[in-house]
């Protein structure tokens, strides 16, 4: 499949027209840039993980596993991550399709982990 030639392609040099040394140097630069980007992404992910695990209020976190209903969770000192999930669940119950899609997608991502824990996810919306 041939692609249309773009105006910006005019300044590109095919790799088979470069010397081995030039190709090696460009590859090295690409590898260094890739490492920098990977470290930045890891740092951002670690920061996000830290923020998500913080409590919403000062004090000890409530044990989310001991709550008997969503109504009991409101007002409790839970983590930011648990708060996000709680809010999305409440919005989905009120009929917000974006929240329902968020939860559905999150459950799809965690199917393998939850099935290992003995929980079977049934998708009734197919």
Image: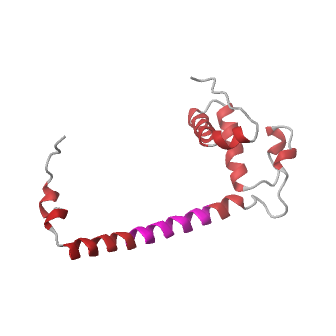
Q: Quadrant of residue 116?
A: top right
Residue 41 lies within the magenta run = yes
Q: Is residue 30 left or right of residue 62?
A: left
- Residue 48: give x, y in percent of width and height: 61, 61
Q: Is residue 35 visible?
A: yes
The residue at the far front in this view is 20
- Residue 9: give x, y in percent of width and height: 16, 58
- Looking at the picture, does residue 87 appear above or below residue 38? above
- Looking at the picture, does residue 41 appear above or below residue 124? below
- Residue 15: give x, y in percent of width and height: 19, 63
Q: Quadrant of residue 92?
A: top right
Q: Is residue 41 left or right of residue 24?
A: right
Q: Quadrant of the C terminus?
A: top right
Q: Nearer the viewer, residue 95 or 60?
A: 60
| Range covered by the magenta-colored residues | 33-48
- Residue 122: give x, y in percent of width and height: 67, 27
Residue 19 lies within the magenta run = no
Q: Quadrant of the N terminus?
A: top left
Count of numbered circles on the image = 0
């Amino acid at each position: 499949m041939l692609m249309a030639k773009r105006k910006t392609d005019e300044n590109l040099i095919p790799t088979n027209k470069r010397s081995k040394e030039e190709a090696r140097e460009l590859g090295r630069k690409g590898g260094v840039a890739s490492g920098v980007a990977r470290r930045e992404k890891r740092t951002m992910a670690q920061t996000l993980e830290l923020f998500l695990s913080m409590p919403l209020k000062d004090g000890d976190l409530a044990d989310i596993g001991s709550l008997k209903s969503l109504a009991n969770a409101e007002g409790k000192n839970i983590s930011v991550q648990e708060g996000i999930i709680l809010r999305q669940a409440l919005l989905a119950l009120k009929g917000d399709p974006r929240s329902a899609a968020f939860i559905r997608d999150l459950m799809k991502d965690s199917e393998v982990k939850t099935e290992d824990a003995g929980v079977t996810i049934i998708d009734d919306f197919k």
